[in-house]
Amino acid sequence: MARCIRWDCSRRTAGVSAAITGGFTAAAWLWAPVMLAAPVGAEPRWRQGVFPVAHFSGYTSHFGTRIGPGGTPEPHHGLDIAAPLGSPIRNWWGGRVQEVIRDGGCGLGLVIVSGPYEHLYCHLAGSVDGGVYRSGAVALAVGSPVRGGQVIGHVGLSGRTSGPHLHWGIRHGGRWLNPAAILRAMAAALSRARP
């Protein structure tokens, strides 16, 4: 049976008090407060961020509450970005791999930590064996350093998904952020940098 982890992007739950298998409870920190706006405005540092999908097709599911496959509202702590199967996925910001995931919700995935930010990548193609995620020439394990823009995987169909896409989630200081707000801050910082 797949373990339920704190990053399960498609967890079906009735609320904050729902117990999570594997020793975690929602109250522990799984369902941390959600922040709907970007943590900062158009600061110059946002120019360092990299859009995570090389071949963008569109957004298929927004951040926040959505109706799940069972017909009930559920939290969605990320942004689903559609892309052709096998499209390269790039690391948003330089950091290191904090967790390699293989479960029924996220499927194959990675958590990368960059200072106070943790970014989650779910539904990847490839395999996980012995704690190492592999996809094409990519091989990453906990502790692996990754640069901003580095290819860290490929779009797949692993976990709970109905089509090829990347689920991209971001936490800052224990709070889920809206990735669309982060992308807007990145775009604003880039536009202000242009003459």
Image: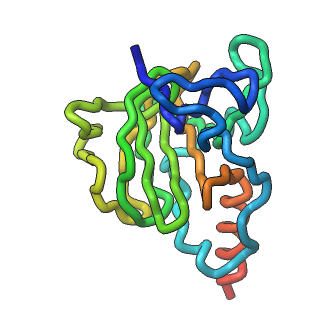
**Considering the image in quadrants, where does the N terminus appear?**
top left
24, above or below 91, in the image: above
**What is the count of numbered marks?**
0
The quadrant holding residue 40 is bottom right
- Describe residue 139's horizontal placement relative to residue 86 as left or right: left
User: Which quadrant of the structure image shows residue 22?
Assistant: top left
Quadrant for the C terminus, please.
Answer: bottom right
Image: 70 above or below 84: above
54 or 126, which is in the foreground? Answer: 126
Q: Nearer the viewer, residue 130 or 45?
A: 130
Residue shown at the point (41%, 43%) measured from the top left: 110
**x and y percentages locating residue 169 in the rendered image:** 59, 46
- Judged left or right of residue 152, residue 59 is right
Percent of width and height locating residue 28: 60, 40
Q: Position of residue 162 (x, y in %)?
A: 58, 19
Q: Residue at x 78, y 33 (%)?
A: 65
Asked if residue 58 can be seen in this view, the reply is no
Q: Residue furthest bottom?
A: 195
Residue drawn at (29%, 39%), measured in percent from left and top? 133
In the image, 44: left or right of 142?
A: right
Instruction: Report the coloring of the rendering.
Output: rainbow
The answer to whether residue 156 of the structure is visible from this angle is yes
- Depicted 44 relative to depicted 186: above or below: below
Residue 35 drawn at (x, y percent): 75, 53
| Residue at the image position 20 percent from the left and 34 percent from the top | 130
